Amino acid sequence: MEATYKKIAQVQNYLARKEGGKIDKLKLVKLIYLADRYHIRKYGRLVTGDYYFAMQYGPVGSVTKDIAGFSEYLAPEELEYAQKYLAPLGGDTNTIISVNEVDGDELSETDVEALDFAYQTFGSRDSVDLVELTHEYPEWSKRKGQLDLGASRVLIDNVDFFENPANFRDDKFALDSDFLAESKEIYERRAAVNKKLAA
């Protein structure tokens, strides 16, 4: 599944609304990653369908980052759509505000489940705390060495989302190993089909 800018804009809008209509941009990006981690481990796909990179402040979805930053890399129709629902707070580009109701047609029931999990479980933490938390998970920690050597970002293999962190107490993403293996198999089958379709 490829990232869709409409869904990602609505994911951001949904979480901004959960936060009272405005949300710190870094916190938003971290919560979306945490929702994606929950969803892929439980249902075999990311909520966003985004491409993840390990960066200094943890895993980051590429399209998620562009939409949250109203990036020049967005196509005009993508930027126009995002701006119908989201805006920076005045001159504060680090705070995103919701400017329209969430279009629920873009989000499935399990998408909302994952977003609610992320917000209910981690929403009380600030962005600095969330960055530290995301560094504990294998999809980032396995790439720390490359980042330490100067890489600005390193592509994450989504298979790593199915790994558990080492020596981590009270992991909120812990699942039965058989269930997790089935989710991973579902993900790998989907990935193989998508690869064939793209060929």
Image (tube, rainbow, N blue to C red):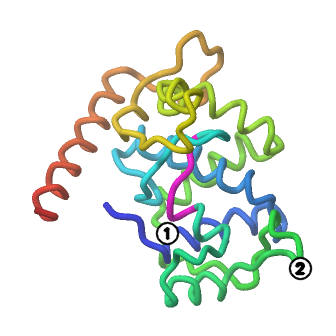
Amino acid type, label 1: Leu
Q: What residue did someone put label 1 on?
A: 107
Give the position of the C terminus as an image quadrant. bottom left
Q: Nearer the viewer, residue 121 or 79?
A: 79
Image x and y of residue 63, in percent = 51, 64
Q: Secondary structure at mark 2?
A: loop
89 vs 46, left or right, is right
Question: Residue at position x 60%, y 54% from top?
Answer: 115
Earlier sequence position, callout 1 versus callout 2: 2
Amino acid type, label 2: Gly
**Mark 1 → mark 2, Cα distance in angstroms:** 28 Å
Give the position of the N terminus as an image quadrant. bottom left
Q: In this picture, is 71 found above or below 176?
A: below
Q: Secondary structure at mark 1?
A: loop
Number of residues whose C-alpha sits closer than 10 Å to that of mark 2, classed few (under 14), some (14–19) or many (20 or more): few
Question: Residue at position x 43%, y 35% from top?
Answer: 161
Farthest top residue? 167
Q: Is residue 132 magenta?
A: no
Contact between marks 1 and 2 (CB within 8 A): the answer is no
Number of residues whose C-alpha sits closer than 10 Å to that of mark 1, classed few (under 14), some (14–19) or many (20 or more): many
14 vs 188, left or right, is right
Q: Identify the magenta region.
A: 59-64
Q: In this picture, is 129 found above or below 191?
A: above
Question: Residue at position x 56%, y 62% from top?
Answer: 64
Image x and y of residue 133, in percent = 69, 31
Q: Nearer the viewer, residue 92 or 96?
A: 92
82 vs 91, left or right, is left
Question: Residue at position x 29%, y 28% from top?
Answer: 181
Q: Nearer the viewer, residue 177 or 98?
A: 98
Q: What residue did someone put label 2 on?
A: 90
